[in-house]
Amino acid sequence: MFFSEAEKEKIVAAIKHAELNTSGEVKVHVEESCPKTDPLERAKEVFLYLSLHKTAQRNGVLFYLAHGDRKFAVLGDVGIDKVVPPNFWESTRDTLRQYFLQGSFSEGLQMGIREAGEQLKKYFPYQNDDVNEIPDDISTEPIP
């Protein structure tokens, strides 16, 4: 695995913390290389494969990282895209890029996840009856 156990724990903790503020669901998927030229296209494949489109409010978010190729993408589901401004994910991508350029992948994901949680709570506030629809672990399984 690309991340140490301590880094994985911090990333998962960031996911759990973000999801305390929003009904949105956050997932991180990490792989060595991106089989697509455009990491956003690969993120779309991963998003579907991991069934992130099956949340009740269609408010899943995928943080995709191909660390060997130094490619990444942030992808929100259609429920998010319907209500947020067109440039909604740009600041989160900028945050990730800033950290990733320094080789700080764990810290970048943590900050990006926190930022996404803060932004999403405006549109998808946490509900008392909220159910964790997507596991908070980091996905590394090979995806066709």
Image (cartoon, rainbow, N blue to C red):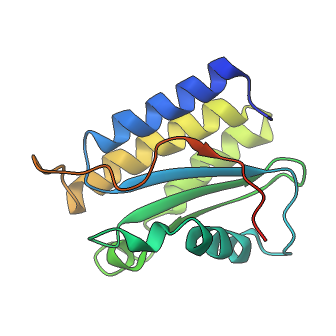
Residue 78, x across and y down, in percent: 40, 80
Q: Is residue 69 above or below residue 58?
A: above
Q: Residue at x 35, y 33 (%)?
A: 17
| Residue 134 placement: quadrant | bottom left
Residue 113, x across and y down, in percent: 48, 44
Observer-nearest of 118 and 64: 64
Q: Is residue 42 above or below residue 96?
A: below
Q: Residue at x 47, y 60 (%)?
A: 61
- In this image, 39 relative to 69: left or right? left
Tell me how many marks there are: 0
- In this image, 70 relative to 92: left or right? right
- In this image, 101 relative to 49: left or right? right
Q: Is residue 128 above or below residue 108?
A: below
Residue reaching furthest to the left: 128
| Residue 60 placement: quadrant | bottom left
Residue 56, x across and y down, in percent: 27, 70
